[in-house]
Amino acid sequence: MEFLIIGGDAAGMSAASRAKRSDPSLSVTVLEKSQDVSYSACNMPYNIADPKRSMDDLVVRKADVFRDKLGIDLRFGHRAVRIDTGERTVAGLANGSQAFQLPYDRLLIATGASPVVPELPGFDLPGVMALKSLTDGRKVKAYLRSHEVKTAVIIGMGYVALEMCEAFHARKIGVAMVKPGPALLPWLARDLAACVEQELNAHDIRLHLGSEVHCIERSGDRLAVIGEGLSLKADLVMVAVGVRPNSELADEARIELGPSASIAVDQQMRTSEPGIYAGGDCADAFHVVSGQRTWIPLALRANRSGWAVADHICGRSVALPGVAGTAAFKVFDMQVAKTGFNSPEAAEAGFDPESVTIKSHSRSHLYTGGSEIRVHMVVDKHSGRLLGVQMVGRESAAHRINAAVVALHAHMTVAEFVQCDLAYAPPFGGVWDPLLIAANQLSKKL
Amino acid sequence: MEFLIIGGDAAGMSAASRAKRSDPSLSVTVLEKSQDVSYSACNMPYNIADPKRSMDDLVVRKADVFRDKLGIDLRFGHRAVRIDTGERTVAGLANGSQAFQLPYDRLLIATGASPVVPELPGFDLPGVMALKSLTDGRKVKAYLRSHEVKTAVIIGMGYVALEMCEAFHARKIGVAMVKPGPALLPWLARDLAACVEQELNAHDIRLHLGSEVHCIERSGDRLAVIGEGLSLKADLVMVAVGVRPNSELADEARIELGPSASIAVDQQMRTSEPGIYAGGDCADAFHVVSGQRTWIPLALRANRSGWAVADHICGRSVALPGVAGTAAFKVFDMQVAKTGFNSPEAAEAGFDPESVTIKSHSRSHLYTGGSEIRVHMVVDKHSGRLLGVQMVGRESAAHRINAAVVALHAHMTVAEFVQCDLAYAPPFGGVWDPLLIAANQLSKKL
């Protein structure tokens, strides 16, 4: 059986490896348009922060391993341009010029996502960059090596933007951030977002909220980011306003799309077209809280979806429940973590949300050290079900969130969650864990 | 209605406060044999570690608050000596001599637990101490102030013993530990216990495993702990071999007892005797994994049981599911955390256990810093249900365990748990959380 995979990052290579391990008789071919496979994109900001480290450090497994040890036919520089679902072939161009056409019995579309770059003047100037692929990362590092970058402007304030802000700051580069919306991290409870804003201020990051960017211009040797009443000089501009799924190939093959034009898949990662799967950042997922389709492209789901495709092709029973919308990131010394819905998202999904925000401490108040931890918790008034949790703090927030993640997967009510026998020891928290304090408060409100 | 409470620590005062807040018309009386209420016993080792801090810092809420703000009739120095279930009265002695007798409509027995002190020669010598109450803590601190303590022997190697070992070490006191059994933390997987042993060795703590203590003798100005082929000189001996429930009063009143002679209670904390509740360290609980009765006296359960009693008395619906056997503690820089059953406990409870032990990392391998984290996970072969998890590591183990705790409460299978959308960001872990790596390995074994 011919198992053909378009895209050699997390989902594609996970599927290829697992399929070949399960059934060595499978013929597995991976078409990768770049020269990189199996790298940790999430580590790029931290790698950029350190001039001594090479981007190649982020390659988790070398191409040779896939080829020689696993027997995967891995083809670099191969860009797929058309899927013929009738003939069951994929056509494309190798190294920009050589046409190829390959048959498949099973096809996995794992084309990932691309950074959104607004179609505005000057966004194609040298020194204006985005960050998604290892190629992007190498460009940023090369630019920092070859130019004296003293100031950077980041367009966008999502978590990639915030991680890049920290990376530039580590390299003693002054950072200004710009976004059109009025709120930093608008999906976060205001009390919690205020902690993040304070952390950015404490590190002299200039935030320009509510500022629409019109264009980027050359300004002598430098660049200028221009908006309404805004002109920010910079040696480098990072565009980090989000990503979009690479679903054009699928769309042209008349495969059904889901939210945000991602590729719609079922719990077996099957698309609407028989024999064709999609996985990773280009595919949608069910949200475990609402059961509705959602598009939240993250690394764990990508890996998991690759495995699921391989397992399904190899005849194993597979049913991925979906994602809980969990995310964690660091903004200097502040940890931000979330899972599930905030109140507006919950209402949108048909729930009747009630929420609470509490302040607690990362350790026992009687134990030395520790720091404030804020928890925002959302519950459905009608059923009492826990719908989402957000946490911000300097210590433990990113690990504490996982108790709430499991509760969401289990469809727990807040009354059930509040009874969980969470760990207690003074160095690690109070008798009542911050999550339990929030749940107790919410229970009173219901 | 007269709500009488025997014991003014976590369970007793939680019940008193919550009952009075819910229904100010209730007459609430608390009989406390000592002069302390509402203190954090768990913080005592850390307080002892610091000569500058007073034990009184550990009082969470002063007696006046309970009396004046909440209107609780709090009586210090009141020792209950007999419960008359026919007459519904409690008789006792105030300040050692004045007899009292008080009626009740509802009675809460919250008498706590006492440290086990073996009945062996010399265990009553000055300088031989145990640690459970604030009075005990004050004695230890006073002894350290008034004596030049250079060496301490700790009899026992449970977590109180280990926390005290750290406290003595912080005060530059050499520590030797003795126990009769051959294994350190025998309930912990051997690989994980080895990490703890290594940590103790690295801090020059001398461990005498497999050494039965026969007696303690005076040796000049000092003490000597004597056993088979063992004679350890010390300036102070700490006896930390466990606790037993203070259930004599209940037993004499013919109230049913549960495991380890704790007081048997239902999910409403009711004993076998109408109108009488028990809560805190003297009472048993259902284990959420097995549904069987167990006795695991810890602070969170104590607080929760006090609230539950108050709620039930005030006419609210209450059903405490029980405990998961969660515990976390710190041994120098090593965090140890567990929840649920290990394999022998699982087999004992009627399960067919399979387990796995994995090594992972607290952060992404590509991110700076971080440290090894070991996970031991136990599952029921028959049903696939997750039965227990243990973790050891220098970073995040105590917080990570809570995801497993919630999974145990939800009766999740390992197949369900492995699909949980746990948080990922390089500073906080790899794409596959250590818990998911363990669950993946176990899934393969099933």
Image: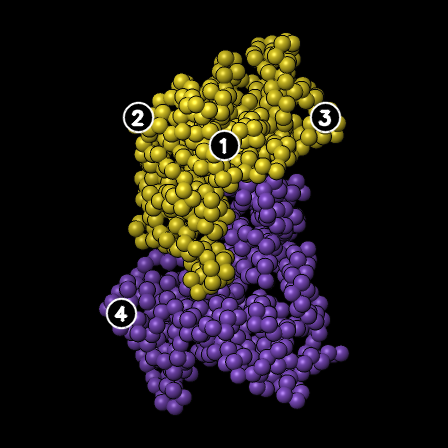
Chain colours: A yellow, B purple
The CA span between labels 3 and 4 is 74 Å
**Three-letter amino acid code at the position of disc 1:** Val
**Three-letter amino acid code at the position of disc 3:** Arg
Residue B73 percent location from the top left of the image: 30, 76
Are discs 3 and 1 less than 8 Å apart at CB?
no
Residue drawn at 36 percent across, 88 percent down? B99
In which image quadrant can residue B270 be found? Answer: bottom left
- Eyeballing the image, is A118 above or below B6? above
Mark 1 neighbour density, 10 Å: few (under 14) some (14–19) many (20 or more) = some
Residue designated by label 4: B69
Confirm whether residue A51 shows in the render.
yes
Residues beneath discs 2 and 3 located on the same chain: yes
Between circles 4 and 1, the one closer to the viewer is 1
Between circles 1 and 2, the one closer to the viewer is 1
Residue B384 percent location from the top left of the image: 59, 45
Are discs 3 and 4 less than 8 Å apart at CB?
no
Residue designated by label 3: A67
Residues beneath discs 1 and 2 located on the same chain: yes
Helix, strand or loop status at disc 1? loop
The CA span between labels 3 and 1 is 40 Å
Residue located farthest toward the bottom when viewing the structure as drawn: B97
Q: Chain of mark 3?
A: A
Between circles 3 and 1, the one closer to the viewer is 1
